Amino acid sequence: MEAREILLPGFTVVGYKIEANLDEIEAGLGKQTYDALISSKDEIANQTNGNVILIQIYPMKPGFHPRVDRFTQIFGYEVTSADRVPAEMIQYTVPESKYVTYTHQGLESELGITYDYLYGKWIRETGNEPRGYDFEIWDDRYKPDSPNNEIDVFVALK
């Protein structure tokens, strides 16, 4: 599958927010947050579907390194309205933007290959610039420990 550019309208999610580096996330914080979201799913009103959305917001600073520097992750569900946000959760609105999208196929542990391709080779070859955030959609194809896993990745572009 080829990466392609698309324009998406803005949308709102309700869920949990964490700030950590990639090592902390991979050491269990990400899984704990995902599990908390899944167990609280029924508390989130006005969901558009059952897909988990993982939003990652990066500090736009020279030399940013995700294994060392902290960044924001939001685990949530898209909602049509965020008029009732459960305690300890947040609402976050993703603006309309142009994105490069690509479907990662394979183990979740190999997702770095997809990100390296999008943020490295694809952006360099197309002359685009990242906007400082990306998101993933985890739908019924999300099977993180299976080679049949598929994750749709969207990198926001300036």
Image: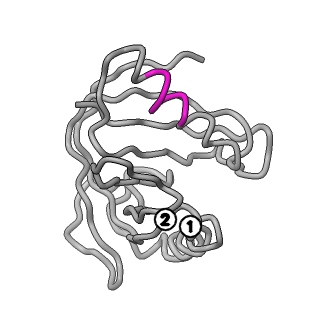
Going by the image, does 139 lie left or right of 107? left
11 or 46, nearer to the observer? 11
Residue in the picture at 28% in, 51% down? 61
Residue that lies at the very extreme toward the front in this rendered image: 63
Residue in the picture at 69% in, 42% down? 110
69 or 108, nearer to the observer? 69
- Which image quadrant is residue 85 in? bottom left
Residue that lies at the very extreme toward the bottom in this rendered image: 87
119 or 17, nearer to the observer? 119
In the rendered image, residue 34, in percent from the top left (x then y), is placed at 55, 67
Q: Amino acid at mark 1?
A: Ile
Contact between marks 1 and 2 (CB within 8 A): the answer is: yes
Residue where numbered disc 1 is placed: 25
Task: Please give the label number shown on residue 21.
Answer: 2
In the image, is residue 157 above or below residue 4?
below
| Residues shaded magenta | 116-122
